[in-house]
Image (spheres, helix red, strand yellow):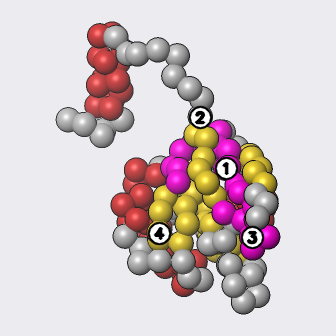
């Protein structure tokens, strides 16, 4: 059996967060939509899901036309069975991630980030699957005392720590 690998760059504006995962059923589209709109009032998002049997369509939903179109485009490029992508505006992954993880159909989350993301896809005769993701860039070193203080100060400034 032959296997081919491809790296697919997720296309999105720098300020947009992406959540990338795998699910197991087309019910995912409606359930993730409900999870997002009930978690953050006024959330703007686009979501797309690659159906892996039957008509094998890219299914989609959302509240923001631009993000819906980007989600559909990225899902089609990745083209892996049961892959989903959510693009967020007016919310951050930390606001919705646990809710998404608790959606019954969600199998795994590969990434949740505003960083540049590349998806590593393997392809066989049967189809395509996500092997992993590259999220951002590698570290430049280890934080020192000043860096620790800045990290703690930042988390308190944005309200995530007391």
Label whose residue precedes the other's in the sequence (2 or 4)? 4
Which residue position is annotated with label 1? 119
| Label at residue 107 | 4
**In contact (CB < 8 Å): disc 2 and disc 4:** no
135 versus 26 height, above or below: above
Label whose residue precedes the other's in the sequence (1 or 4)? 4
Q: Quadrant of residue 117?
A: top right
Label whose residue precedes the other's in the sequence (3 or 1)? 1
Q: Which residue: 56% across, 82% down? A: 25
Distance of label 1 from label 2 (alpha carbons): 12 Å
Label whose residue precedes the other's in the sequence (1 or 2)? 1
Distance of label 3 from label 4 (alpha carbons): 18 Å
**In contact (CB < 8 Å): disc 3 and disc 1:** no
Q: The residue tagged with tag 1: helix, strand or loop? A: strand
**In contact (CB < 8 Å): disc 3 and disc 2:** no
Span highlighted in magenta in the image: 110-129
Label whose residue precedes the other's in the sequence (3 or 4)? 4
Which residue position is annotated with label 3? 127
Which residue position is annotated with label 2? 136
Q: Position of residue 66 (x, y in %)?
A: 73, 59
Callout in the foreground (1, 2): 1
Q: Which residue: 79% across, 70% down? A: 125
Label whose residue precedes the other's in the sequence (3 or 2)? 3
Left or right, 47 with respect to 39, comes to right
Residue 44 seen by the camera: no
Q: Position of residue 112 (x, y in %)?
A: 51, 49
Distance of label 3 from label 1 (alpha carbons): 15 Å
Magenta-span inclusion, residue 124: yes
């Amino acid at each position: 059996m032959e296997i081919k690998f491809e790296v697919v760059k997720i296309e999105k504006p720098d300020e947009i967060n992406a959540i990338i995962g795998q699910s197991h059923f087309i019910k995912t589209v409606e359930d993730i939509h409900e999870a997002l709109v009930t978690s953050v009032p006024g959330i703007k998002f686009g979501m797309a899901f690659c159906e892996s049997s039957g008509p094998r369509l890219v299914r989609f939903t959302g509240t923001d036309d631009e993000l819906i179109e980007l989600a559909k485009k990225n899902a089609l490029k990745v083209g892996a069975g049961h892959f989903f992508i959510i693009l967020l505006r007016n919310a951050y992954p930390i606001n919705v991630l646990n809710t998404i993880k608790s959606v019954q159909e969600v199998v795994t989350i590969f990434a949740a980030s505003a960083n540049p993301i590349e998806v590593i896809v393997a392809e066989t005769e049967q189809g395509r699957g996500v092997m992993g993701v590259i999220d951002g860039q590698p570290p430049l070193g280890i934080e020192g005392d000043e860096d620790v203080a800045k990290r703690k100060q930042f988390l308190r400034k944005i309200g995530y720590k007391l």
